[in-house]
Image: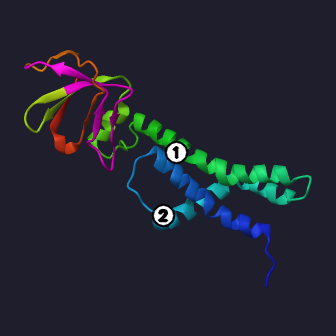
């Protein structure tokens, strides 16, 4: 039986682990359908190869240093940087590049729905009214503590501060003691945003 060598483990980890980490971090930042890693194995390997190419210098240093008593800590730090930290940073960097390209209109917006685009681009609070299925209207302030779901399940909304609305649709006063309102897509016909 052949002798186990740490270099083989590093080589295997170098072509699987970084891509899997990048895919996982990207999925935490950008909403998407749940997909198992086995369905993204080719993408994971491609991302790992790209990471390997970019991080070849610290990986080479780690392999040259080896795991002797004097260099083991530095070797581990270089490997963790190359196979864990860097792959966790790449998705953030990629998103910044895409956002820059979107702002310059060199690529189309990445939002999958108008709902996602609107709520993702909000910087300040807005007034929201939801026209319910029975024709009544509820609404209030959609602010920092509010939430709008995103792809693949858009349409769910939490409005943090519920207000009384008169017959003409004007916001009158906050409803005291109200913790806000949760609405599902089936609860309302459409939203008005002010």
Q: Residues within 10 Å of mark 1 (few under 14, many from 20)?
A: few
Asked if residue 152 is positioned above or below residue 129 in the image, the reply reads below
Q: How is the image coloured?
A: rainbow
Q: Which residue is mark 1?
A: 94
Question: Where on the picture, by quarter, is residue 62?
Answer: bottom right
Residue pushed farthest front? Answer: 177
Bounds of the magenta span?
A: 139-167
Is 182 in front, or is 171? Answer: 182
Q: Which residue is mark 2?
A: 40
The residue most toward the top is: 172
Q: Is residue 61 above or below residue 8?
A: above
Count the marks. 2
Residue 120 in picture, x, y percent from top left: 37, 35
Q: Earlier in the sequence, mark 2 or mark 1?
A: 2
- Residue 78 appears in view: yes
Question: Residue at (83%, 50%) from the top-left corner?
Answer: 73
Provide the secondary structure element on which disc 1 rests: helix
């Amino acid at each position: 039986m052949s002798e186990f060598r740490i270099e083989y483990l590093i080589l295997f980890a170098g072509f699987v682990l970084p891509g899997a980490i990048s895919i996982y971090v990207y999925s935490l930042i950008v909403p998407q359908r749940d997909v198992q890693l086995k369905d993204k194995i080719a993408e994971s390997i491609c991302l790992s190869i790209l990471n390997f190419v970019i991080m070849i210098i610290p990986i080479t240093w780690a392999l040259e240093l080896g795991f002797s008593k004097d260099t083991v800590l530095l070797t581990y730090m270089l490997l963790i940087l190359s196979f864990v930290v860097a792959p966790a940073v790449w998705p953030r960097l990629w998103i910044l590049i895409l956002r820059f390209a979107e702002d310059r209109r060199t690529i189309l917006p990445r939002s999958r729905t108008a709902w996602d685009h609107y709520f993702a681009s909000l910087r300040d609070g807005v007034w929201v009214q939801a026209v319910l299925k029975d024709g009544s209207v509820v609404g209030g302030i959609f602010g920092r503590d509010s939430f709008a779901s995103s792809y693949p399940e858009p349409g769910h909304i939490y409005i943090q501060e519920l207000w009384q609305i008169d017959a003409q649709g004007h916001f009158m006063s906050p409803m005291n003691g109200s913790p806000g309102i949760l609405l599902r897509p089936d609860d309302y016909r459409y939203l008005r945003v002010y």
